[in-house]
Amino acid sequence: MSNPSSLPPFPSSVPTAPLLRLSLSKLQAHDVTETHNLLQACKDIGFFYLDLRDADEGIALLTNADELFPIGERLFDLPLNEKKKYDLASQNSYYGYKAQGAMIADRQGNLDGNEFYNVSKDDILNLITTPLPSPQILQESRPLLSSFIQTSHNIVTLLLSILSTSLSLPSSSTLPNLHRLSAPSGDQIRFIKAPPTATQNNPTLGEHTDFGSVTILFNRLGGLQVLPPGADAEWTYVRPLPGHAIINLGDAMVKFTNGLFRSNIHRVVAPPGQQAGFTRYSLVYFARPEDEVPLRRLESDRIPALGEGVVEEEISSKDWVIRRALGRRVDLGRPVDYEKAAGTEGVSRRLGV
């Protein structure tokens, strides 16, 4: 198993995205400057670093993540035929295993270069009556997975509470109440493995926006790139920082705020420099609105009004997530509509709207 200390460092000569670094402890204390920085990051690019080292909850999350990385490695070391037993896409589910090359990665029709395994929050927290089938290593890890989910969700709730206040929503609980831990939702942990085969022209994961509300990402190698706003913007690496999570907003937050918040285009390519020769593992927590929440603008004077004659699509979070999660799968015998699977938010962000 790979040891973080044995991995080559991110090259200092490579330009990186100038993401804001926010402090979890300052956000917990509702520091005025830090809460302002959070709002600004959500409006400007929708990505920021969160320093977890200065708060007990953050340290607990870092510890959970360190324990889950080797579990992810062992999970992907299972034989392919064994892993494919847990590909639930044919059952219209986005949980379980997805093999390398099962999804379209870009508009040219190239296939994706990673494999991943989605673990349902509802399953791990026993919110469904019948547990989902899973490999033995995940069954043995349910207490750890539960801890990671609950700690991640507590941090998501904090961020959503601060943003509710910043947006002058009816209460600080408005956004958190659309993302209750105990309610059925598409929240999940994702384990990702990307072998050292991606290039700039053949990305592991093509340009996309996330389709939930808040993403918490841990990785130890570079590879993640963002396309900042602006007509002349170029793809820029996001440097992994020890002790920090990379946080980004998804399209649900764009819908709730009618475009005030940004769900920024990003992709995954080969890590830079000597890191390119190593397998890249990632660990993600996706927080999404509850299944029955309609994805539409929330009422607030601080949220832009809908344009004249604009009619919002009537769709629930559950239907939206399924459409986005399975929309690029090429192995399900369905036509793939890349733009529809990319999401209207993703298209508008790519065009700089």
Image: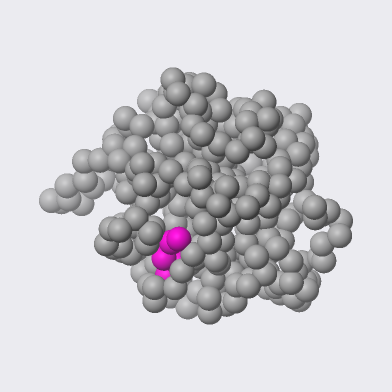
Question: Which quadrant of the figure has residue 11?
Answer: bottom right
Q: Position of residue 109 (x, y in %)?
A: 39, 73
Q: Position of residue 300 (x, y in %)?
A: 33, 35
Locate residue 309 relative to residue 268 in the image: left or right.
left
Position of the C terminus by quadrant? bottom left
- Name the main secondary structure of what is drawn in magenta: loop
What colour scheme has been applied to the protein in the rendered image?
Answer: one colour
Locate residue 54 relative to residue 200 in the image: left or right.
right
Tell me what residue is drawn at x 67 percent, y 26 percent. Answer: 143
Say above or below: 265 vs 311.
below
Locate residue 34 relative to residue 8 in the image: left or right.
left
Tell me what residue is drawn at x 76 percent, y 42 percent. Answer: 66
Tell me what residue is drawn at x 17 percent, y 47 percent. Answer: 311
- The residue nearer to you, when weighing 10 against 229, is 10
Q: Position of residue 260 (x, y in %)?
A: 39, 49
Say above or below: 150 vs 138.
above
- The residue nearer to you, when weighing 282 against 110, is 110
**Is 184 part of what is drawn in magenta?**
no
Question: Which quadrant of the figure has residue 152?
Answer: top right
Tell me what residue is drawn at x 83 percent, y 53 percent. Answer: 3
Locate residue 101 relative to residue 142 in the image: left or right.
left
Say above or below: 313 vs 123.
below
Q: Position of residue 181 (x, y in %)?
A: 50, 25
* Residue 50 in sight in this render: yes
- The residue nearer to you, when weighing 28 against 324, is 324
Q: How many marks?
A: 0
Q: Which residues are magenta?
A: 102-106
* Residue 43 in sight in this render: no
